[in-house]
Amino acid sequence: MKKSADGLFSAFVEGVSPGDRYRYRVDGRGPFPDPASRFQPEGVHGPSEVIDPRSFSWSDSDWRGSGLDGLVIYEIHVGTFTSEGTFSAVADRLPALVDLGVSAIELMPVADFPGHRNWGYDGVALFSPARCYGKPDDLRRLVDAAHLRGLAVILDVVYNHLGPDGNYLSAYSPFYFSSRHRSPWGQGLNFDGERSSVVRGFFIENALHWIHEYHADGLRLDATHAIVDESPRHFLAELAAKVHAFVSGRRVLLIVEDSRNLAQIVRPANEGGWGLDAVWADDFHHQVRRILTGDSEGYYRDYSGSSEDLASTIRKGWFYCGQHSVHLDGPRGTDPAGVPPRRFVFCIQNHDQVGNRAFGERLHHQVDPAAYRAATTLLLTCPQTPLLFMGQEWAASSPFLFFTDHNPELGQNVSAGRREEFRYFPAFSDPMVREQMPDPQAESTFLVSKLDWDELEAEPHAGVLRLCRDLLHLRSGEPALAAAGGEDFAVDAVDEGGIAIRRIPRAGPAILAIVRLEGAGAMDLRGHPVLASREGKNWETVLTTEDARYAIDPMPPRIDLTEEPVIQFCRPGALVLREAIQESRPISRSHPKWTG
């Protein structure tokens, strides 16, 4: 191979065909797999395979991507979404997701990793789809099938570290990793030191690889707060600019997971921002969970669980805008004023918040079903972009655990480290209790995390699914819930445990969601600002979470609001009201009207 002026080596080899396998020798060492390999058929330590990305016949030439307006994201781990655990099996389930009403699937990282099971955040072959999920063209078929059904595909990518096993970048150059920065997973990547321009280019090319060769509609960038870059132009800003410049004819979204609450991440470049499209805003999740489960350890120490704080979080997009964080022992966040609500991604569950619990409990495993239905209604009537984690739409019985398949020595360290992480939590202070935690290395830990699709037809799962589906169809069909602007909503803490959200479109009836997340009692709406501009309007009840369609033991709230706007809840619950501007349009049943 010949060295160019910028320090890169290249060679042209005649007679190479798709399916041929190859490795590199570097200064007499190796052979090593290609760090930009398009496929690793024998695993991340084996030879790389030549792939022709142009041989696949796409049928999505009319597809133009997806913007943030109307976006509803459904997060999937390919290996546990189905019993087969493959790209092809995910494609077979797409009709169910279309029927549910989501508009995009987000695949947890698919870049190849060591072993046969992993969350994906230990990826090392960043350009190669994991061979345990299928071949490169299997991923292309999944994306093509999704586009055919009107679904966008977002891929989760990891640019803050590489996994500890099978990472060969340092065998090729000492400049890929920083000599000055560390990450929570070890040596940091070199985004701002000597030869960092080539390193930055490597990861930008990776982003464009998934977008161009696999027609991905967007990327979700993992834990970008762990990307240390002290250069004048942050790597994320350069990435956003180049992705948006080098993709034409369709919309591509860049979404980041970032715990810093930095508004500049999603502000446009012409306003001094980094130009990314959206950010995971975890404050909403933490507030909801604090209310529902009472969690108060770790970062939950920063949240009161009050209705007023929850309302403030929804109103602004996140709660911490520069206030002191007890957990961080310092200020956190910036003011997001002017950032449209759709740029914040809200959830009540995701892979982290479920899988990083010792026993992988989903939210509905720990809260009353009535409260879970109320929280679901709150999430899907907020103006922010909602994210669902696979199976939450039917309250799946399976947990989602942390699992790996590392070599024996590394695997033993991972298992021990997992237990060590929990020793500081009072519930796990006893070593015997920690020993009961599922072993990440055990195959059974992976298998028990697979979804059981047979549950969908059985109660109470079917009722939860009907609620989620009805709410998503309302979200797409009601002008008020589909409205994208920030001027169309107001949110108010009615009392302790009670939230009211008003959504008003530019044209069409307003929507009012009344949510009680905890306890029973009367919610008195008289004089609350959320109703101030709608006095004298007639309202009809679209649904309540206590309808027999959703609850196997319904306890309907008393909605006698013809004179005074007071709702009596028998337990946690929610209702959705529509302003009766025109002829009543009940969706399938009769509910009383309310003259406010």
Image (cartoon, rainbow, N blue to C red):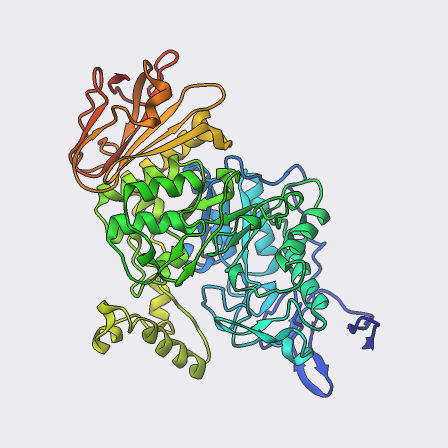
Which quadrant holds the N terminus?
A: bottom right
Residue 9 seen in render: yes
In-front residue for pair 588/579: 579
Q: Give the residue drawn at x 35%, y 15%.
A: 580
Residue in view at x 64 percent, y 54 percent: 237
Say whether residue 534 is left or right of residue 58.
left
In the image, taking residue 158 as reference, residue 283 lies left or right, namely left
Q: Residue furthest top?
A: 583
Quadrant in the rendering for residue 492 = top left
Seen in the picture, residue 366 relative to 476 is either above or below; the reply is: below
Q: Position of residue 283 (x, y in %)?
A: 39, 50
Dividing the picture into quadrants, the one containing residue 65 is top right
The C terminus is located in which quarter? top left
Q: Splitting the image into 4 quarters, where does residue 99 fall?
A: top left
| Nearer to me, 319 or 169 | 319
For the question of whether residue 396 can be seen, the reply is no
Residue 166, position as x, y percentages in the image? 56, 76
Residue 552: % across, % down = 19, 38
Total number of numbered discs in the rendering: 0
